[in-house]
Image: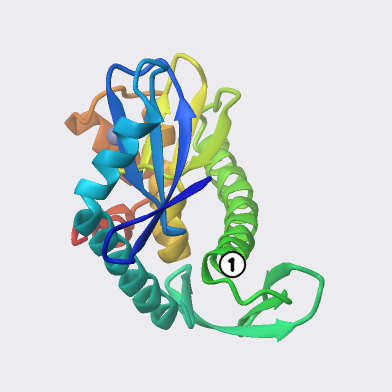
Amino acid sequence: MKTIKLSDGREITYELTRKRVKNVNFRAKENGIVAVSANSRVSVRQIEDFLAERADFFLKAFEQMQKRALENSKNSRLVRFLGRDFPVRIIENSREIAVLDENELRVFTKSSDESYIAGLREKAILTRFAALCRELDGEVRARLSEKGFAPPPVRISIKDMESRWGSCSYNRGHISINSRLSAYPRETVLSVFYHEYAHFWHHDHSQNFYRFLLELYPDYYKHNNVLKQN
Ligand SMILES: [Zn+2]
């Protein structure tokens, strides 16, 4: 890490990584440092000249990031889980863990770093969401069996996805569930499970697919439409 001083007294700190990149890449990071990656032919002098030239741009980006972080920390006094808001309570304690119980999310930490605390919170939510997904998976499989359909072995993964609530690789026996669903009601998450499981029998979104789905889960639209409004 290196800091350069500009002629007007302001400073920019950067971290240089040598990589086989075409030119030079600059990225303003949350912690107020510019991450620079450059190939070995680009000199430190060239990099620092560029940083000095574009100082206004980088300093402004940091300012905006800080503003955003502050706003997020205000909003973060509540977390949404299964359609309900839970207040967040910070308890000064060295356990460094967050626990979601019936009424609140308790964060045991000695740190006051917002992004670190957000990480603890997220982990607690994800742990609870993963447990719920195992439960819902069992529920859907039981329902299928009851209806006379034998569900194939399925591996479930939970991940953050940009544009889909779930996906099914029917030939690999793999279902992905979007972790962002943890904010929605249980029945809505369940509707995604039914939807993805139904793809093992109907690969497209044909009328037969929806007929099959509604037979398994008659309230499908009621609970799944919540997602379409977002
Ligand atoms: Zn689908």
Q: Residues within 10 Å of mark 1 (few under 14, many from 20)?
A: many
**Residue at the spot 69% in from the left edge and 71% down from the top edge:** 99
Viewer-proximal residue among 35 and 182: 35
Rendered location of residue 180, percent (x, y):
41, 54
> Which quarter of the rendered picture does the C terminus lie within?
bottom left
Cβ of disc 1 within 8 Å of ligand 1? no
Rendered location of residue 199, percent (x, y):
36, 28
Asked if 168 appears above or below 143 in the picture, the reply is above
How many marks are shown on the rendered structure? 1
Residue found at the very far front of the displayed protein: 7
Is residue 164 among the parts visible in the rendering? no
Asked if 213 appears above or below 65 in the picture, the reply is above
Rendered location of residue 129, percent (x, y):
57, 56
Q: Is residue 129 left or right of residue 77?
A: right
Viewer-proximal residue among 157 and 197: 157
Q: Quadrant of ligand 1?
A: top left
Element class at badge 1: helix
**Residue at the spot 62% in from the left edge and 85% down from the top edge:** 89
**Residue at the spot 47% in from the left edge and 62% down from the top edge:** 186
Q: Is residue 140 left or right of residue 89?
A: left
Residue found at the very far right of the displayed protein: 94
Under mark 1, the amino acid is Arg
Is residue 90 among the parts visible in the rendering? yes
Rendered location of residue 185, percent (x, y):
43, 66
| Pointer 1 residue | 121
In this picture the colour scheme is rainbow
Asked if 161 appears above or below 118 in the picture, the reply is above
Viewer-proximal residue among 124 and 182: 124
User: Which quadrant of the view contains residue 161?
Assistant: top left
User: Which quadrant of the view contains residue 19?
Assistant: top left
Viewer-proximal residue among 59 and 196: 59
